[in-house]
Amino acid sequence: MKIFEYSPYFNEKKALEIKLREGAKWIDELHFCEADRTFSYEPKELHFERDTRPFPEHAARIRHHVLSSEGSFRSPLAEQIYYDPSQGLKGFDRGYWALLTGNGAYHNEAVQRNHALPILRDAVEDDDIVILSDLDEILDSRLADRIVEETRRHQIITVKLHYSVFYLNLFTASNHGVPNFSYRLYVLTGRYFRTLPFAPDYLRKRGIEGGFLSEIHCLDEPAGFHHSWLEHERTAFKKLQAFAANVEDQSIIDPDYATKCLRDRRLHYLDAELYVDNDKQFLRSLEEMDTTGLWI
């Protein structure tokens, strides 16, 4: 049995380091897909190989995949359709396909997430385990046996994640979609993955909307962390720019957006309260790395 994880990559060095260190404790192959354009179709440099250079001890388990935007990404339309977190996707299937055809950025995000299928489908055996995640969604290696056991029992599972922003210990009181940041990250048997009846992006988006609550098992306790926008002074504005075409309210595409959220203790685009919690059982990998500046 081997364990594979697939994540899109966009220049988030600290989240990458946590992912590598925590994954090294139980995951055999960590696959990262990096595109040569942002979701908003702006050209960008490929950073992944440079960003992983300081971690040669993890090189054997890292797989880097470059996705060419030529023929796969779309430039934003003059009149974009936008996703409203407060409204969701009404009548999911119709709303989902309308969003992907009417918003170039969401289409591009889906292309990069769905690239897991051609990359892993021929490499994965029935007895293997596949994790589909975003880069900043990190499973707790202490729960590895439990996660594998439950995945074998149900064929596919999802998990709850503690959701922090800007700092490791600054958490959101709520998120859009299904609570506890669940139904976003999935763990599947190799057999289920190879016969997956829909693409990974569809799985994630419908899960967020609550479309799999009665079909896909979710672990009772949180099984990891979503550490978003770490090193926010360096990364937050660039990430906002990369997603700019997803957002109808362009006022949040602001170099001071993170500062405003921290000042108000509110994640404004979700209208979610932020709070400090130092009592959670943080990931073991944080003890092995320099986390200076990552705690509030």
Image: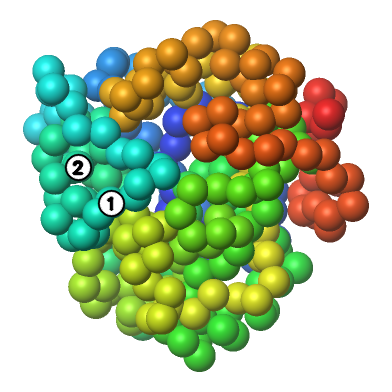
Label number found at residue 89: 1
Decide which of tag 2 and tag 1 comes sooner along the chain: 1
Q: Which residue is label 2 attached to?
A: 99
- Identify the residue shown where x is 25% and y is 54%: 90
On screen, 108 above or below 88? above
- Identify the residue shown where x is 69% and y is 71%: 221
Q: Amino acid at mark 1?
A: Leu
- Residue 192, percent across and down? 33, 79
Mark 1 element type = loop
Determine crowd level at label 1: few under 14, some 14-19, many 20+ residues with C-alpha closer than 10 A.
Answer: many
- Identify the residue shown where x is 21% and y is 59%: 91
- Residue 266, percent across and down? 66, 30
- Residue 284, percent across and down? 81, 54
Mark 2 element type = helix
Circle 2/circle 1 CB separation < 8 Å = yes
> Residue 17: which quarter of the image?
top right
**Disc 2 and disc 1: Cα gap in Å?**
9 Å
- Identify the residue shown where x is 49% and y is 80%: 217
Q: Say which of marks 2 and 1 sits in front.
A: 1
Q: Is residue 129 visible?
A: no
Outermost residue, top direction? 255
Q: Amino acid at mark 2?
A: Leu
The quarter of the image holding the C terminus is top right
On screen, 218 above or below 295? below
> Residue 85: which quarter of the image?
top left
Q: Is residue 217 visible?
A: yes
